[in-house]
């Protein structure tokens, strides 16, 4: 049998391939082509997110009529596309480029008339890559809120609920700006459960909730007194009641689709089980769930246990890392004492980027924890400092793929050979 690491990386790549944005959009447009244009109309195609470039390329391949095209993505995935303008924003914390991109999107779709058709291509990362802060809120204030949300251990829905209430773009803002032109959105989901309101903070769907709910999220997380005064003032005002124009939103890819692809490939040689497609919550709890599942699995034949999800990390130190790296490190710690035989665990983001690092995640086994000590580092101290990147780097246990051009959250793969 092949080396476990090679197998795990091959399985992970199968999940990434299934989320290929161009292929996903192509399959959808073969089933249902782009909407017809009335006489004198044109397409306004706007692509937002980490998969913006391949989705735009594919969309333009299906257009024979007049169109205008605008793309917003991150620097790592940026590329020129003939006939389209590209803008670069920052992720996970927005910057001036993100603000310029958000304004450009609103100005772009505002030009559309009733006889035009707005095509919105949405993928993960759009929440930070394009921002349009509400009146009275500066970009620095918005970025500060984003940093607080990322460090508070909140799930993606809670974070996006708050973000929407601070934005002119999110929570249906693109729809309102494009009216009276109808909007047709094709969405690649990076959100567990595929709530369209949460993907890129829902620029083409209704908001998750209102300003009162956003206040509650911040208050319950102990963040209310830490957010800038302009944000507190804005969220304390009565919420708007602007009508949301209708749109056709179509899901073309998701974490579950990718998880199924991994399971299909693994089942050819392994006793395979999808344990959960909603591995969420703190990485400490997630690591325990993974170890518990591994301990209870049959030990007489090769097993592959699979998860999909998006965990969170409570930040207490100033080290580098991300949720996948810390999850992998915690599984290495617990597995060293609690698991027998030859095993391996991989946790990585399908976008190739885990937190503010160049790694997609981590890949660990029974020797990883000790390997960190052998090169002169204290793995527990690194973990306590949220420095999973250093810990996995010195153990040669990082998963580094580079930008993948897609994003459907994270995949976790546990492999074990018979005792």
Image (cartoon, rainbow, N blue to C red):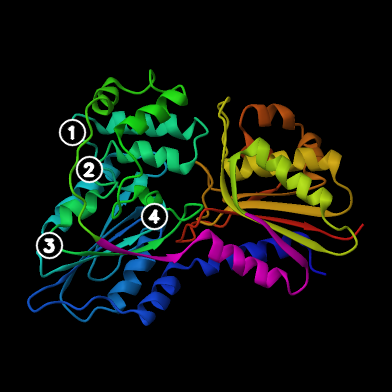
Secondary structure under the numbered disc 3 in the rendered image: loop
Mark closest to the chain's N terminus, 3 or 4: 3
Residues under numbered marks 1 and 2 in contact, where contact means CB atoms less than 8 Å apart: yes
Please name the residue shown 80% across and 62% down the image.
Answer: 303
Given contact means CB atoms under 8 Å apart, are the residues at marks 2 and 3 in contact?
no
Give the residue at mark 4: 196
Quarter location, residue 239 = top left
Callout 2 crowding tier (Cα within 10 Å): few <14, some 14–19, many ≥20: many
Name the residue carrying label 3.
112
Q: Is residue 16 left or right of residue 106?
A: right
Residue drawn at point x = 27 percent, y = 76 percent: 34
Of callouts 1 and 4, which one flags the residue occurring earlier in the amino acid sequence? 1
Q: Quadrant of residue 35?
A: bottom left
- Determine if residue 75 is in view: yes
Q: Name the foreground residue: 399 vs 221.
A: 221
Disc 3, disc 1: CB below 8 Å? no
Q: What are the residue bounds of the magenta stretch?
A: 247-276
Label 2: which residue?
168
Residue 256 on the magenta segment: yes
* Residue 245 within the segment the image draws in magenta: no
Residue at 14% x, 52% y is 107
């Amino acid at each position: 049998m092949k080396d476990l690491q090679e197998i795990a990386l091959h399985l992970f790549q199968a999940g990434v391939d299934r989320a290929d944005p161009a292929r996903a959009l192509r399959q959808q447009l073969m089933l249902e082509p782009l909407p017809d244009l009335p006489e004198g109309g044109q397409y306004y195609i706007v692509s937002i997110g980490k998969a913006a470039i391949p989705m735009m390329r594919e969309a333009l391949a299906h257009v024979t009529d007049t169109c205008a095209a605008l793309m917003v993505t991150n620097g790592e995935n940026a590329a020129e596309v003939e006939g389209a303008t590209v803008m670069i924003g920052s992720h996970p914390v927005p910057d001036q480029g993100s603000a310029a991109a958000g304004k450009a999107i609103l100005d772009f779709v505002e030009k559309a008339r009733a006889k035009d058709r707005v095509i919105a291509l949405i993928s993960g990362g759009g929440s930070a890559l394009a921002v349009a802060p509400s009146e009275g809120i500066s970009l620095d204030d918005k970025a500060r809120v984003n940093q607080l949300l990322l460090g508070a251990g909140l799930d993606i829905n809670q974070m996006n609920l708050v973000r929407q209430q601070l934005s002119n773009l999110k929570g249906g803002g693109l729809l309102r700006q494009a009216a009276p032109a109808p909007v047709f959105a094709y969405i690649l989901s990076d959100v567990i459960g595929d709530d369209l309101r949460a993907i890129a903070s829902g620029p083409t769907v209704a908001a998750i909730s209102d300003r009162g709910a956003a206040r509650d999220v911040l208050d319950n997380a102990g963040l209310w007194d830490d957010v800038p005064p302009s944000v507190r003032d804005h969220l304390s005002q009565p919420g708007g009641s602007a009508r949301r124009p209708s749109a056709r939103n179509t899901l073309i890819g998701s974490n579950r689709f990718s998880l199924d692809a991994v399971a299909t490939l693994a089942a050819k040689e392994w006793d395979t089980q999808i344990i959960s497609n909603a591995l969420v919550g703190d990485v400490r709890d997630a690591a325990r769930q993974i170890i518990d599942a591994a301990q209870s699995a049959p030990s007489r034949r090769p097993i592959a246990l699979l998860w999909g999800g998006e965990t969170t990390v409570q930040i207490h130190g100033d080290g580098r890392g991300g949720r996948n790296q810390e999850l992998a490190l915690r599984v290495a710690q617990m597995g060293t004492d609690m698991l027998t035989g030859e095993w391996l665990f991989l946790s990585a983001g399908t976008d190739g980027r885990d937190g503010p690092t160049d790694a997609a995640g981590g890949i660990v086994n029974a020797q990883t924890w000790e390997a960190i000590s052998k090169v002169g580092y204290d793995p527990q101290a690194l973990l306590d400092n949220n420095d999973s990147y250093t810990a996995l780097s010195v153990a040669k246990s990082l998963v580094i793929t580079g930008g993948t051009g897609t994003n459907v959250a994270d995949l976790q793969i546990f492999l074990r050979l018979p005792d």
